[in-house]
Amino acid sequence: MAADALLLGRRTYEGFAEAWPSRTGEFADKFNTMPKYVVSTTLENPEWSNTTVFSGDLAAEVRHDLIDEYRLMVFPVVLGTGKRLFTEGADRFPLQVVDLRQTGEVVILTLRRGQEE
């Protein structure tokens, strides 16, 4: 795993925090000890090691140009409405597809910042 930290939403964090702390092995050890950043206005006392909660405006806390790789879990369901991944008016930047894998009904998409044209 090449990541040095995780940026998660509350629901994903809670699922991971329930599953990973009890696991062992090289991958689990890295996952459990690496820094985890959670975007949430409701998570108050995270118990999983090395967790920091961003409860305010994420854009003010983290500039998106600090992120060089995105790993998105896509659940192919049409909802009709939903939240945007990036806020309206966010700076445009290209992404390159590095990896695309299907695991059950979930598609894991790995994207890296591309070169501006």
Image: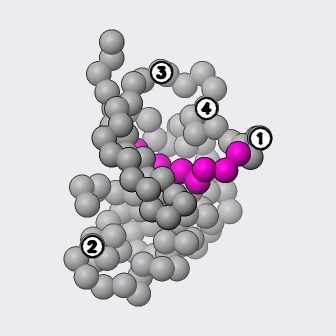
Assess whether mark 2 and mark 4 are in contact (beta carbons under 8 angstroms). Answer: no
* For residue 102, side relative to residue 117 (left or right): right
Circle 2: residue type: Phe
Give residue 79's position: percent from left, percent from top. 74, 46
Q: Quadrant of the C terminus?
A: top left
Q: Residue at x 35, y 37 (%)?
A: 97
Disc 4 vs disc 2: which is toward the camera? 2
Residues at marks 4 and 2, CA–CA distance in whole angstroms: 33 Å
Q: CA distance from mark 2 to mark 1?
A: 37 Å
At 52% from the left edge and 79% from the top edge, which residue is drawn?
18
Q: Residues within 10 Å of mark 1 (few under 14, many from 20)?
A: few
Q: Is residue 63 above or below residue 44?
A: above
Q: In front of the other: label 3 or label 1?
A: 1
Pick the residue in front: 101 or 50. Answer: 101
Q: Which residue is mark 4?
A: 87
Three-letter code, disc 3? Arg
Q: Amino acid at mark 4?
A: Thr
Q: Give the foreground label among 2 and 1.
A: 1
Tell me where the magenta segment starts and ends, as one range. 68-78
How far apart are labels 4 and 3 at the CA level?
A: 11 Å
Q: Is residue 62 magenta?
A: no
Residue positioned 31% across, 41% down in the render? 98
Q: Which residue is mark 3?
A: 92
